[in-house]
Image: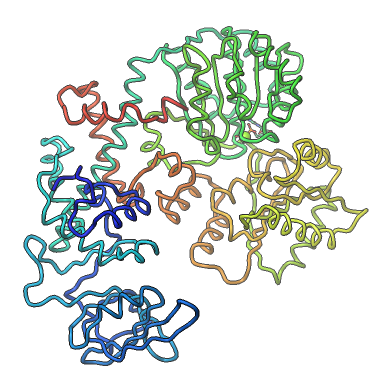
């Protein structure tokens, strides 16, 4: 058989199972079945015995026979099947709640079975619920070439199990396929295979399911990881290099009045060295004649917005409009007022375009944008609607990039010819290795320095029994004139229930901080835009002492007088989110605090997250920890945007392989920019041409 064969023709599949495979795992072809790797293996040579079972056993393989089959009815059409399973050292109970009829028919006394599963202790007796089960192999169980003690274990869904596609059944399918597998086209060029001592693709695909031994498994994994990393980075680096060679961009050659007057008259403090360096990097891009696609990373409060504004002024100096797109109306509005204030007296037309404006207002703003009268436009998603036409859009800033989907960016990019220069700003730093891999086609600037005079936020972990102490500390802060945030997580799928939690929280806070002495604001996603703005304003102006909110305040909200961030149920937040929330304080001259309230018993990773937060304020360290704790495949935004589509490789654990493939591709593209000497790679690029690429769309 070949990889492109329809899975339905594989012996043992048939139309019903093919349908389940397609629905549950998106497997349609034999190749896709082989791409569904085992998540672990059972070594049959180390079989467990009943006597040896312990709490630490985990998933085990036992060999023995069954007896004493019993069915009890547990409701209409429901029954429980129990069977005694014994080997020479003792016996345990096997239990089924579903598929009992099938099991009953299949199990025979006096037959040796291999059973696999996770034993649990129930009333002093070991049990395995829904074990995997197969007849124990006779003396020569397998047909060549798959004679191996390694049994693959696959993730399966309930629906698959109901349709006879448990992990053992999956293993039989992959075994059948591996035995019947014909030619498998190679995807990597021969000289690369040789240089890195990689096994062939065919050999690797068979061995990832049925390795003869550990070495063979390692070799298969290395080959497949190499391939994943190689092609992912090839796509990004190729997009990058071909853009450098081809895409033309506006040339912003002059530094004019807008920039100079702002720089000389409006900034009350010196720029940090990091800000200066980044502005220089961006200026060089803008003069190069190629379209800029740059990622600007910098921790919260490092002064990215100021850098962005200055670059927008450069665009104005060169006769273009510039826009800034923010993820929420609160943020966009806040940027708008910040810009108005900073640009006061410079005679620059700044416009705010958000969804909640009245239609007539929107219409006239759009007209001004189209005529070129509006020079700087701040907005939300409203900016990318089709009827927003710019006169001459030269520069686009996208704030907090992880909140925007790929398609949305693409639409902004398409609003001008030649396309505008694009600066993507993110305050959720990405470890360097990851950035170089995933954003291999974006140039990257980093502001790695905070403005002088900032005190790092001090972070504490407190549990419920310490709440009175926490509140008396908060009272002191308020009495000293400071303000406080309380943030509650969104827990339920149902916004109404989340709101309930928030209101409970509000009542609790108000009971400690009674009116009229203390004033409390509340902010959440269910409020109308004008209500949000009203609450935010009162807090900003110091009319309320406390802001009780959901994570709507996570991004960018700037109230320098707020010095304490209390995060309730902090164990429910991810690290990136905790870091973002903490970034809401520590923005003024006063010492600020972040208090992480949690329940008593934390799981391992929750505790690790809290510990990380208490031990560092460095966004890059936090990002590293996040990646380690969650695994790169899980990184928010990356996975869903398809940027980090890795099945085996890990950006962290396989760093040497990441670096090797990155350097290899770099060298290949340097010596042969169109890859004319590598037909296989050329073919891959031609095939993936239609895929949306980050660099093209940011
Ligand atoms: P970011 O967007 O990176 O979170 P901002 O640009 O909003 O940071 O800056 C945070 C605060 O620091 C703002 O109040 C800004 O005016 C101030 N700021 C920016 N650059 C400097 C600097 N070089 N020196 C002092 N303060 C600065
Ligand atoms: Mg910001």
Is 195 placed above or below 350 here? Answer: below
Q: Nearer the viewer, residue 373 or 78?
A: 78
Q: Position of residue 528 (x, y in %)?
A: 76, 39
Residue 467 horizontal side relative to residue 385, left or right = right
Q: Quadrant of ligand 1?
A: top right
Q: Residue at x 63, y 36 (%)?
A: 452
Total residue callouts:
0
Residue 241 horizontal side relative to residue 422, left or right = left
Q: Residue furthest front?
A: 76
Q: Residue at x 39, y 90 (%)?
A: 125
Q: Residue furthest right?
A: 516
Residue 465 horizontal side relative to residue 177, left or right = right
Is 100 placed above or below 503 here? Answer: below
Q: Nearer the viewer, residue 259 or 391?
A: 391
Is 343 placed above or below 88 here? Answer: above
Q: Residue at x 69, y 50 (%)?
A: 550
Scheme of colours in the image: rainbow
Q: Position of residue 99 (x, y in %)?
A: 36, 73
Q: Position of residue 598 (x, y in %)?
A: 63, 64
Q: Position of residue 176 (x, y in %)?
A: 15, 59
Q: Residue at x 22, y 89 (%)?
A: 87
Q: Nearer the viewer, residue 46 or 543?
A: 46
Residue 286 horizontal side relative to residue 681, left or right = right
């Amino acid at each position: 058989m070949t990889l492109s064969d329809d899975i339905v023709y594989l012996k043992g599949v048939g139309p019903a199972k093919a349908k389940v495979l397609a629905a549950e795992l998106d497997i349609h072809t034999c190749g896709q079945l082989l791409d569904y790797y085992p998540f672990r293996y059972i070594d049959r040579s180390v079989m467990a015995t009943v006597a040896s079972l312990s709490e630490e056993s985990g998933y085990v393989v036992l060999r023995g026979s069954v007896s004493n089959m019993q069915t009890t009815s547990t409701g209409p059409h429901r029954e429980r099947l129990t069977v005694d399973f014994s080997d020479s050292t003792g016996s345990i109970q096997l239990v089924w709640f579903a598929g009992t009829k099938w099991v009953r028919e299949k199990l025979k006394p006096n037959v040796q079975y291999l059973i696999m599963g996770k034993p649990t202790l129930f009333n002093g007796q070991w049990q395995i619920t829904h074990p995997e089960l197969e007849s124990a192999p006779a003396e020569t169980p397998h047909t060549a070439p798959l004679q191996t003690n390694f049994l693959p274990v696959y993730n399966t869904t309930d629906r698959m199990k109901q349709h006879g596609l448990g992990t053992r059944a999956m293993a039989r399918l992959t075994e059948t396929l591996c035995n019947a597998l014909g030619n498998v086209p190679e995807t990597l060029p021969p000289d690369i295979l040789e240089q890195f001592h990689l096994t062939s693709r065919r050999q690797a695909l068979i061995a990832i399911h049925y390795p003869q031994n550990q070495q063979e498994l390692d070799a298969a994994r290395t080959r497949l990881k190499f391939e994943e990393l190689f092609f992912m980075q090839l796509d990004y680096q190729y997009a990058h290099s071909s853009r450098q060679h081809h895409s033309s961009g506006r040339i912003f050659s002059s530094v004019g009045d807008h920039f100079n007057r702002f720089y000389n008259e409006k900034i009350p403090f010196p720029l940090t060295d990091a800000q200066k360096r980044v502005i220089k990097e961006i200026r060089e891009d803008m003069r190069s004649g190629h379209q800029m696609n740059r990622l600007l990373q910098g921790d919260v409060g490092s002064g990215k917005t100021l850098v962005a504004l200055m670059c927008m002024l450069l665009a104005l100096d060169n006769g273009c409009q510039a826009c800034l797109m923010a993820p929420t109306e609160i943020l966009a509005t806040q940027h708008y007022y910040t810009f108005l204030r900073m640009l006061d007296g410079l005679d620059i037309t700044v416009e705010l375009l958000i969804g909640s404006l009245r239609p007539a207002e929107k219409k006239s703003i759009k007209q001004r944008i189209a005529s070129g009268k509006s020079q700087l436009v701040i907005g939300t998603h409203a900016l990318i609607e089709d009827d927003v036409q710019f006169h001459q859009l030269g520069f686009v800033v996208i704030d907090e990039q992880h909140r925007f989907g790929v398609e949305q960016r693409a639409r902004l990019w398409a609003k001008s010819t030649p396309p505008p220069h694009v600066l993507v700003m993110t305050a959720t730093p990405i470890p360097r290795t990851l950035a170089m891999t995933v954003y291999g086609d974006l140039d990257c600037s980093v502001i790695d320095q905070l403005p002088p005079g900032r005190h790092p936020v001090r972070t504490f972990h407190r549990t419920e029994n310490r709440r009175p102490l926490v509140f008396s500390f908060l009272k002191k802060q308020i009495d000293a004139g400071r303000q406080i945030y309380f943030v509650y997580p969104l827990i339920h799928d149902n916004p109404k229930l989340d709101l309930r939690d928030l209101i409970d929280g509000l009542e609790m806070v108000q009971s400690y901080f009674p009116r009229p002495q203390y004033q409390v604001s509340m902010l959440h996603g269910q409020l109308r835009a004008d209500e949000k703005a009203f609450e935010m304003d009162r807090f900003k102006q110091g009319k309320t002492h406390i802001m009780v909110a959901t994570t709507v305040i996570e991004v960018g909200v700037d109230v320098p007088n707020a010095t304490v961030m209390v995060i309730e149920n902090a164990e429910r937040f991810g690290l990136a989110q905790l870091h973002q929330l903490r970034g809401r304080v520590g923005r003024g001259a006063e010492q600020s605090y972040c208090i992480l309230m949690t329940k008593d018993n934390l799981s391992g990773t929750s505790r690790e997250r809290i510990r990380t937060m208490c031990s560092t304020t460095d966004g890059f360290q936090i990002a590293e920890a996040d990646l380690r704790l969650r695994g790169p495949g899980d990184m928010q935004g990356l996975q869903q945007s398809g940027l980090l589509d890795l099945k085996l490789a890990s950006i962290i654990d396989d760093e040497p392989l990441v670096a090797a493939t990155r350097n290899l591709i770099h060298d290949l593209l340097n010596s042969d920019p169109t890859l004319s000497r590598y037909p296989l790679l050329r073919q891959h690029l031609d095939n993936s041409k239609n895929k949306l690429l980050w660099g093209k769309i940011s």
